[in-house]
């Protein structure tokens, strides 16, 4: 359900006279949540920033196409999700993955060494485990675990059934638990 504040922001986005200021407000309002959702998908700060820039460029260029039947946040998440998936697919094609990288080793070490990563070894292992999940399971796990998104909102965002999302989440959790038991 849209709030009065969101309805006003959407109205301002649709008005050419107030669009630029409303867009700046939207960027300030949603940047951090979107950044962390993207960052958990791609793991790297610079890549996440690039994806965020592309997300907001696409949002700006397609404001007139925004169907107001969904929440603004859902529309932005969908753009960010699609940009993240496109990025991961391009990156997969670009680099030949060695056996070690395919098994995820090194991701935790890279995260701990990243100056933008402020977590501990356990968080790094969790991110490493999630990096091994198939794209959809990773997306569902991140949205549910970190963003605490409801399955109904995820269903609208990812255009799939709640049952399929619940199954993906539980399979992802099982794989992550197995990964932790192997790396304890």
Image: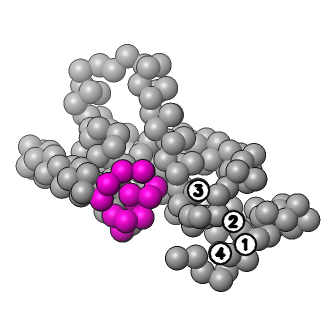
Residue occupied by mark 2: 26
Up-down relation of residue 68 to residue 86 (above or below) = below
Up-down relation of residue 12 to residue 163 (above or below) = below
Residue 9 numbered mark, or none: 1
How far separated are the C-alphas under marks 4 and 2? 9 Å
Q: Residue furthest top?
A: 96
Q: Earlier in the sequence, mark 3 or mark 2?
A: 2
How far separated are the C-alphas under marks 3 and 2? 10 Å
Up-down relation of residue 128 to residue 1 (above or below) = above
Q: Earlier in the sequence, mark 4 or mark 2?
A: 4
Tag 2 near tag 1, CB within 8 Å? yes
Residue occupied by mark 3: 76
Tag 1 near tag 4, CB within 8 Å? yes
Here the colouring is one colour
Percent across and percent down for residue 45 are 52, 46
Percent across and percent down for residue 99 are 24, 21
């Amino acid at each position: 359900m849209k709030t009065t504040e969101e309805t006003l922001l959407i109205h301002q986005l649709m008005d050419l006279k107030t669009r630029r200021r409303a867009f700046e407000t939207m960027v300030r309002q949603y940047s951090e949540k979107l950044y962390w959702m993207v960052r958990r998908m791609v793991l790297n700060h610079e890549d996440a920033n690039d994806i965020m820039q592309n997300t907001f460029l696409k949002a700006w260029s397609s404001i007139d196409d925004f169907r107001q039947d969904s929440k603004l946040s859902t529309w932005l998440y969908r753009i960010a999700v699609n940009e993240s998936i496109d990025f991961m697919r391009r990156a997969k094609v670009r680099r030949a993955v060695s056996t070690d990288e395919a098994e995820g080793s090194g991701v935790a070490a890279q995260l701990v060494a990243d100056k933008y990563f402020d977590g501990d070894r356990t968080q790094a292992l969790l991110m490493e485990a999630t990096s091994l999940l198939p794209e959809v399971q990773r997306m569902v796990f991140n949205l549910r675990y970190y963003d605490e998104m409801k399955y109904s909102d995820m269903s609208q965002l990812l255009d799939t059934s709640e049952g399929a999302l619940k199954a993906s989440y539980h399979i992802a959790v099982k794989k992550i638990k197995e990964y932790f038991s192997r790396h304890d």
